[in-house]
Image (cartoon, rainbow, N blue to C red):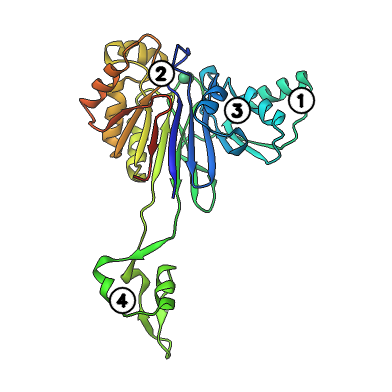
């Protein structure tokens, strides 16, 4: 199975040479998801071979320009490329108006349907669910209404518990199939012969949380800890030495991002949304690593397998 994240943009507010504003591509098996869509996202998609026509879902965190100004261009290109399949967009209030007014004045009549769902919740809430994954919207602590998103795999696939491997060798293929699909096996008298819960276990599932833009929030970390999140992306706009600026603008420092990773009990932390003031972003990673060792930079083009 595939659960792969590709970073398309790592810059906060301003694009600078080789650093683009926020966008990420997440692939869960055959489902293609775009998280935020800053200006220049199309160029990044071309560079990293992500086909715009394959995107099924777009999740927009908030309506600061560095997170969505590439969206109308992308929609327009999808139309030009003769997209036909429906597109599902999730965003806070206002995006429908913005898209509507741009389409109105360019007299754009799309040859595909957009389903735009307004995200509006003051506590973590499931906003989308499909057979193999679900998405939660997580309210962020930012200057305007803003949501992080949690992507959780769903699976009911089971495997044999290692301690019963020998017993399985004595079973016929139908019995094994039944147990692995979560069904008990009965004898001819209708009595329980094999208990699937005793003999098998669910295969592990994985999850990815995207938190941007936000000031430090211990509350959200406690929620993530309860959800057993594997990979966490947390914005790290500033260094600790610029903490005052971070507080004023409702952003986080690299150290704070790492503290959230510790509290969330995640396996790995990705930091991004770097201020243009830092030319050497390695210093942000160094700062975070002092608190949380498994910290990686969300650099353009970097890929991260959530299920490994
Ligand atoms: Zn931003
Ligand atoms: Zn913002």
Q: How many marks?
A: 4
- Marks 1 and 2: in contact by CB < 8 Å? no
Q: Secondary structure at mark 3?
A: loop
Q: CA distance from mark 4 to mark 3?
A: 57 Å
Looking at mark 2, is its residue's CB closer than 8 Å to ligand 2?
yes
Q: Secondary structure at mark 4?
A: helix
Residue at numbered disc 1: 108
Q: Which mark is residue 93?
A: 3
Find residue 202 and report its horizontal and vertical position in percent: 37, 60
Q: Earlier in the sequence, mark 1 or mark 3?
A: 3
Find residue 228 and report its horizontal and vertical position in percent: 34, 45
Q: Which image quarter: residue 109?
A: top right
* Residue located farthest toward the top when viewing the structure as drawn: 277
Q: Secondary structure at mark 1?
A: loop
Please tell me which residue is depicted at 51% across the width and 28% down the height of the picture.
61
Please tell me which residue is depicted at 68% across the width and 41% down the height of the picture.
85
Q: Earlier in the sequence, mark 4 or mark 2?
A: 4
| Disc number lying in front (1 or 3) | 1
Quick check: 302 above or below 173?
above
Q: CA distance from mark 1 to mark 3?
A: 22 Å
Q: Earlier in the sequence, mark 3 or mark 2?
A: 3
Residue at numbered disc 4: 169
Please tell me which residue is depicted at 34% across the width and 11% down the height of the picture.
278
| Disc number lying in front (1 or 4) | 4
């Amino acid at each position: 199975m595939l659960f792969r994240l590709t970073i398309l943009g790592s810059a906060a507010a301003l694009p600078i040479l080789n650093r683009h504003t926020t966008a990420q591509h997440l692939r869960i098996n055959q489902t293609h998801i775009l998280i935020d869509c800053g200006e220049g996202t199309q160029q990044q998609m071309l560079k990293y071979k992500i086909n715009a026509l394959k995107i099924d879902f777009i999740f927009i965190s908030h309506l600061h320009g560095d997170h969505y100004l590439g969206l109308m261009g992308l929609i327009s290109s999808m139309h030009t490329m003769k997209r036909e399949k429906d597109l599902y967009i999730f965003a806070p209030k206002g995006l429908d108006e913005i898209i509507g007014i741009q389409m109105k004045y360019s007299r754009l009549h799309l040859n595909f349907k957009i389903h735009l769902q307004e995200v509006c919740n003051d506590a973590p809430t499931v906003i989308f669910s499909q057979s193999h994954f679900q998405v939660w919207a997580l309210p962020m602590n930012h200057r305007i209404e803003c949501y992080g998103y949690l992507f959780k795999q769903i699976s009911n696939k089971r495997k044999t518990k290692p301690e019963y491997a020998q017993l399985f060798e004595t079973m016929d293929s139908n019995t094994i199939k039944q147990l692995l699909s979560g069904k008990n096996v009965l004898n001819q008298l209708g009595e329980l012969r094999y208990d699937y819960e005793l003999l098998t276990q669910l295969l592990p599932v994985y999850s990815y949380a995207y938190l941007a833009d936000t000031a430090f929030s211990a509350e959200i970390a406690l929620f993530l800890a309860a959800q057993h999140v594997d990979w966490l992306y947390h914005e790290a706009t500033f260094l600790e030495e610029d903490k005052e600026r971070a507080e004023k603008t409702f952003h986080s420092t690299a150290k704070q991002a790492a503290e959230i990773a510790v509290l969330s009990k995640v396996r790995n932390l990705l930091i991004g949304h770097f201020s243009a003031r830092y030319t050497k972003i390695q210093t942000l990673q160094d700062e975070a690593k002092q608190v949380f060792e498994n910290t990686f930079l969300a650099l353009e083009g970097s890929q991260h397998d959530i299920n490994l």
